[in-house]
Image (cartoon, helix red, strand yellow):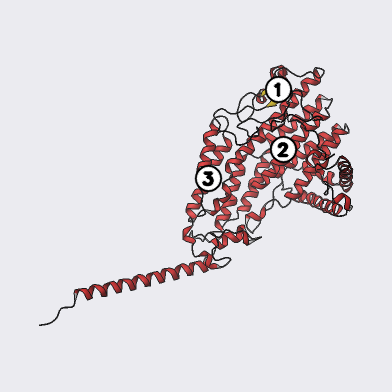
Amino acid sequence: MAHLPSRRGGILKKLLITLAIIIALVVVLVGYEAFLAVTSKPAPTQNYSKQIHDRALERQRAHFGGGLNQWPRFEAAMREVDKASQWLREYNEALPSEEKASRYNYISFYVLVWPAAEGGTRAQYEVARRRALEVLDYWQAMGIFDRATDIAALERVAVPPIDTPTIEMILPYLGSVRQLARAHAARMRVAAEAGDDRQFLTTFEESLALGRITSGQGFLISWLVGVAIDAMALNQLAECLLLHPVAEEQWLIAADAAIEREQFELYPPLQHVMEDKRLETADEVQRSFTASGRFIPLAHARLLYANDMTYAPDELLPFGETRFSNLHARLFLSRRAADAWLDRATELSIISANATGSASIGADRAVEAFTGDVTWRNPIAEYYSYLGQLARTERARQINAAGTRVILAIERYRLRNGGAIPQTLDDLGNLLPEALRTDPFTEQPWDYQPSPVTTRNDGDPLQPGSHAWPYTLRSRPLPGSPPSDTPYPIHPNHGILITTPIEAPEFDE
């Protein structure tokens, strides 16, 4: 009688075959993944830097009309500022050793504006101030401020497009732009002290123009630097008017017109900045993914950490700067998912940027909720965690600019009334346009009091020798806003003080 094959043996044989197939498949898959890891390459297809460049020119041409890009003139002027900055560094290196040992061991334009921030002895400050004035005079002799006048007259300035990653296109003179802005602040203070109202106003206008041109380049960092430049100019305008009031109403009218023009009519909307940011990230995506949508960790790291790869996080490069760090690519979001996330984040940020009044609260919460749960699986979203702060920065910029215009209206009233201050803003009549009777963000009337501020931001009393406006102007808190995380009002949702006092210098002796 023939023996039938053992059932147990047949099952074992099938299991072994199945196991062999599984092992073979695993080997094939691992081999395929390893092959993809070492061969993955990005395939850029679009020049997003040109799109950003074109958008910047389009915005400016909408205001100033058609014409060529004036970037060469801007660049030529900034190269002169670079030379002047290099001269200043060499000047500081040659300071006597006793001055290098003081708190004023580096002469900068700040010493002409904010001596209280430096400390040191009064004698050290006087030496540093004298040297800073010498530097300012030397820059004048070098023709730097003639170049600043040229910059302020430019109408169409856009960084030329490049063929390399768009991230490398960022305005190449940000450091020099900031240095020139600091020089402008010092020139405003020195002119006001000397009673040179014409130079005071001209420098103020040139500073605002510099900030606007910087902000309009299409990159978020450029916009932030431009905002900082404008805040410095507005702050210096207010401080100079408090310390050295002008006697001509026409001067105040011209200063108001400059703010309206540079801070509102010509200023790039935050929405455009966010749209340009999306183009910048689109370039990042096309250089961090394959054409089929597979993430390339090594390519992404080399794009963002090119200057020092040691800053690349371990979850991005577990095997260091080798192609084996691409093995875990499937753990990251696909290109389609990354693009969808970026599109939604941009959409929400634009809604928040455009929101005013109570509508901004829900818009801000939506941005925070969406960007708050970003993980390492979505590395391109890393720099989107600050989206909520951008709207706050823009709102503060608008409140400060509008509030400064209200100060100018009050000062016009005082000139007409022998220095008397209005008891209410209604007393200003036609001096205060209807559009300025509420702040541009909360859309509420200003909080005006016909009495001076008596405390510092932290609540402590002002020190003897401090200067305060004879009246107080601030924006009102927005009802329903989340609690403030700061002990004093600097958040647009919680009110911003416009009539900031000037605190007395604090010297060591």
Crowdedness near tag 3: few (<14), some (14–19) or many (≥20) residues, C-alpha within 10 Å: many
* Earlier sequence position, callout 2 versus callout 3: 2
Q: Which residue is mark 2?
A: 231
Query: On screen, 166 above or below 433?
Result: below
- Counting from the top left corner in percent of width and height, residue 457 is at 70, 32
Whether residue 65 is visible to the viewer of this picture, yes or no, is no
Label 2 or label 1, whichever lies nearer to me, is 2
Q: Please name the residue shown 76% across and 26% down the image.
A: 469
Nearest the camera: 251 or 58? 251
Secondary element type, mark 2: helix
Query: On screen, 422 above or below 11?
Result: above
* Earlier sequence position, callout 1 versus callout 3: 3
Q: In the visual, does 46 lie left or right of 90? A: left
Work out how far the residue at label 2 is from the one at label 3, CA to CA, in angstroms.
Answer: 28 Å
Q: Which residue is mark 1?
A: 432
Work out how far the residue at label 2 is from the one at label 1, CA to CA, in angstroms.
Answer: 22 Å
Q: Which residue is mark 3?
A: 371
Amino acid carrying label 3: it is Thr
Secondary element type, mark 1: loop
- Counting from the top left corner in percent of width and height, residue 351 is at 54, 38
Query: On screen, 379 above or below 318?
Result: above
